[in-house]
């Protein structure tokens, strides 16, 4: 990642508040916000923390990272979560269209560099990754991605994936 030539672009809909880099980093820009008593509070520019995406229903962690942005509304209003790779693609790759998918070319969902992203239709993405169209294969792929412990032979062949060591020992 070449940070010396890192480019920044405003996040659409949040211009003057947040920017996204072509390397997949996010920052809040220097500005003023309204404090609790209504006075203006200075906010310095800072690089934002990115968090793993969690599914709301089962709490499982997905392989993507997200960032939460505020639009200047009161603090009791929830912020909105955005997938970082979609923000990078929108700013540096091209216009996102209705129903489009943003694909990580190298398959590494943590690599949000603009050169690793491409915008595809759902059909193109399904042809590229057939498991997306087949729910059973998709669920198996997600479960494998969540595995923390891998059982493998001396040759390096993976023979099982488990969430905890106890599952691997009892298998």
Image (cartoon, rainbow, N blue to C red):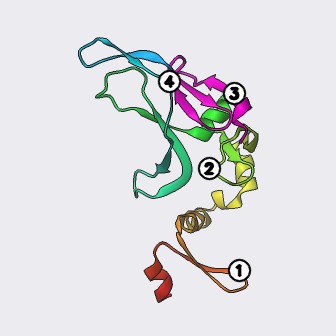
Determine whether, in the image, residue 133 is placed left or right of residue 70: right
Contact? badges 1 and 4 (CB < 8 Å): no
> Looking at the image, which residue is at 58% across and 39% down?
84
Contact? badges 4 and 2 (CB < 8 Å): no
Spatial CA span between label 4 and label 2: 24 Å
Q: Position of residue 106 (x, y in %)?
A: 74, 53
Q: Position of residue 133 (x, y in %)?
A: 65, 57
In the rendered structure, find residue 7 and report the number of the disc placed on it: 3
Decide which of tag 1 and tag 2 comes sooner along the chain: 2
Q: Nearer the viewer, mark 1 or mark 4?
A: 4
- Against 82, residue 145 (above or below) is below
Decide which of tag 1 and tag 4 comes sooner along the chain: 4
- Magenta highlight range: 1-29
Image-quadrant location for residue 9:
top right
Q: Position of residue 89 (x, y in %)?
A: 67, 35
Q: Secondary structure at mark 1?
A: loop
- Residue 155 counted in the magenta span: no
Mark 4 surroundings: few (<14), some (14-19) or many (≥20) residues within 10 A? few
Contact? badges 2 and 3 (CB < 8 Å): no
Decide which of tag 3 and tag 4 comes sooner along the chain: 3
Q: Residue furthest top?
A: 39
Q: Secondary structure at mark 4?
A: loop
Spatial CA span between label 1 and label 3: 40 Å
Spatial CA span between label 1 and label 4: 46 Å
In the rendered structure, find residue 156 and report the number of the disc placed on it: 1
Image-quadrant location for residue 37:
top left
Decide which of tag 4 and tag 2 comes sooner along the chain: 4
Q: Secondary structure at mark 2?
A: loop
Decide which of tag 1 and tag 3 comes sooner along the chain: 3
According to the image, label 4 marks what residue? Answer: 45
According to the image, label 2 marks what residue? Answer: 110
- Against 59, residue 104 (above or below) is above
């Amino acid at each position: 990642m070449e940070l010396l030539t890192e480019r920044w672009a405003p996040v659409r809909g949040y211009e003057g508040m947040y920017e996204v880099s072509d390397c997949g980093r996010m920052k809040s820009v220097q500005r003023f916000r309204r404090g609790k008593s209504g006075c203006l509070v200075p906010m310095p520019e800072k690089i934002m923390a990115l968090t793993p995406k969690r599914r709301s229903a089962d709490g499982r962690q997905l392989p993507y990272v997200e960032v939460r942005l505020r639009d200047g509304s009161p603090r009791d209003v929830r912020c909105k979560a955005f997938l970082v790779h979609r923000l990078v693609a929108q700013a540096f790759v091209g216009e996102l269209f209705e129903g489009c998918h943003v694909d990580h070319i190298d398959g590494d969902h943590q690599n949000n560099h603009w050169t690793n992203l491409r915008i595809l239709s759902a059909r193109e993405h399904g042809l590229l990754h057939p498991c997306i169209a087949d729910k059973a294969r998709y669920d198996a792929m997600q479960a494998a991605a969540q595995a923390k412990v891998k059982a493998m032979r001396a040759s390096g062949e993976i023979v099982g994936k488990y969430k905890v060591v106890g599952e691997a020992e009892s298998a």
